[in-house]
Image: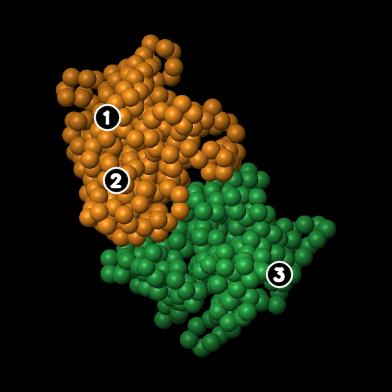
Amino acid sequence: MTALTDDTLPVTPRAMRDEMIVFAVMALLLASVPFSGVYPFFVMQALCFALLACAFNLLIGYGGLLSFGHAMFLGTAGYCSAHALKVWALPPELGILVGVAGAFVLSIVTGYISIRRQGIYFSMITLALSQLLYFIYLQAPFTHGEDGIQGIPQGHMFGIFDLSKPTVLYYVVLVGFLAGFLLIYRIINSPFGEVLKSIRENEQRAISLGYRTDQYKFLAFVLSGTLAGFAGSLKVFVAQNASLTDVHWSMSGEVVLMTLVGGLGTIFGPVVGAFAIIAMQQYLASFGQWVTVIQGSIFVICVLTFRRGVVGEIAHYFRRSL
Amino acid sequence: MQALFAQLLVGLINGSFYALLSLGLAVIFGMLNIINFAHGALYMMGAFVAYFLLNNDYLSIGYWPALIVAPIVVGIFGMILERTMLQWLTGLDHLYGLLLTFGIALIVQGVFQNYFGSSGLPYAIPDQLKGGMNLGFMFLPVYRGWVVIFSLVVCIATWFLIEKTRLGAYLRAATENPTLVRAFGINVPRMITLTYGLGVGLAALAGVLSAPINQVRPLMGADLIIVVFAVVVIGGMGSIMGSIITGFALGVIEGLTKYFYPEASNTVVFVLMVLVLLVKPTGLTGRAA
């Protein structure tokens, strides 16, 4: 059985340098968006999904666990944040904290249940759990069912930054994204990340080396779910609503697609994939249902012809780690 | 009391769909090692093929021939899928099969949504099965009784085919050791293709059966498939009989929930899945993964 990412390169000083250069370029490009005339709302939305995809990639790309229900963290954190901001009238930073805490608790519960089975069973369990939550949110009073929570006040971050101004909001979202990204990067390159990779490559061997692989996978699941929740909380400020679409399982499918297109197990792949898919949805919106067909075709093409994804293929061609 | 039996019947009907679908999934998983995410879309295709056959001016084939023709048509479509796409995934991680079939499901559902919208199309109950019987304690619509009995027969026939016949023995042997079975002169790739066709045909058959009960619509399989996945997790994919029994049992439990506590009827299968996983992570009839 070949692993998901069959030719990852070892971490060398050169690889670290490459990655830092690409990170600096990415940060600069993103920071210059408000001066470039690009529609900032689109970039903010893409940044939220990029963070979600990065968090998802932490689980599949480095732990080999395909979660098909990651939308539940996005949606749960979104609902928690939205509720905290609108009903409890908390300031934005506390609103985000409530959302992240919600995703944290949810990931502990769902992780404890789903980590018990491996491979495709794990995927099916996460999918079923997210569908369970979908029905709960559909009926629960605080989510307002089909209407969702709307008209969320954006407020002042730390009492200083006025989030109703698009440029301020943009930089707050950008800082959130970069912080999340660096945290994930740090996790991947830590001893914990190395153990995770060894579990992905050969779980039996990792067990025989004395690692309690279930604990590592559980921790990776909680980290991934919590960070996905952070993306969901940020998204509330961008979209100013929290709705059922964020919890529905088709959203989980989109996250998988983003990561697959960009490259499973690459550091920058999910970001590229998220931007590609969001741009596609933005510009192909007039095609209506054909967008689903196009997304499905991309899935099929990716799996059949370029499993490494865009960034993965580039990295493979230049023999670099990206 | 009437309502309780009515819900029990609804549960049995849903259970027969769960059983037929998870049975097909189990057959495909056994041979191809793929969780067929496209199963729901192919179930929907079965219903649509029956709808076409009935409403096309030149064909206007009714329910009875459709019961045979639709599974064959969709089965052939499935075999083409297997030959052109799925077979390239042999030896890769399971997850790629899941992702590929998910993509196929999106394409199929998207195409149907484009041509038929998202609303349902009606399919009339065939004349011979109209009406109902008064059993004294409840009123039994004939068609619903027919669905339960017919799918039970199909399930048992499939079980018999795989567990008791020579062909089934080849199949099970090829699952265990394809290379060795090949050395005995059996065309394993063709068997794999036919198996996929069989599994897909079972899904399409469920689609035709469901057409007169549930309306024919492009997303009819999309949400059902997730429940079926939960059924599979609960039952474990260890045995054919296991998926049949689990399918029917969960349908009945769902029906009972609808009577006693309707709010939980959408979620009861998932809640059961959680409980089973906490007590017995391998599922009720499953072997250790």
Taking the view exactly as shown, the residue that stands out farthest to the bottom is: B136
What whole-number distance in Å separates the C-alpha atoms at marks 2 and 1? 18 Å
In the rendered structure, the colour chosen for chain A is orange
In the rendered structure, the colour chosen for chain B is green
**Is the residue marked by circle 2 packed among few (<14), some (14-19), or many (20+) residues within 10 Å?**
many
- What is the chain identity of the residue bearing mark 1? A
Establish if A303 lies above or below B12.
above
- What is the chain identity of the residue bearing mark 2? A
> Taking the image as drawn, is residue A113 in sight?
yes
Taking the view exactly as shown, the residue that stands out farthest to the right is: B58
- Residue linked to disc 3: B68
In percent of width and height, residue B171 lies at 58, 71
Along the viewing direction, whichever of B182 and A56 lies nearer the viewer? B182
Q: Are marks 2 and 1 in contact (CB under 8 Å)?
A: no
Q: Residue at x 23, y 37 (%)?
A: A190
- Residue linked to disc 1: A182
Is tag 2's residue or tag 1's residue first in the polypeptide sequence? 1
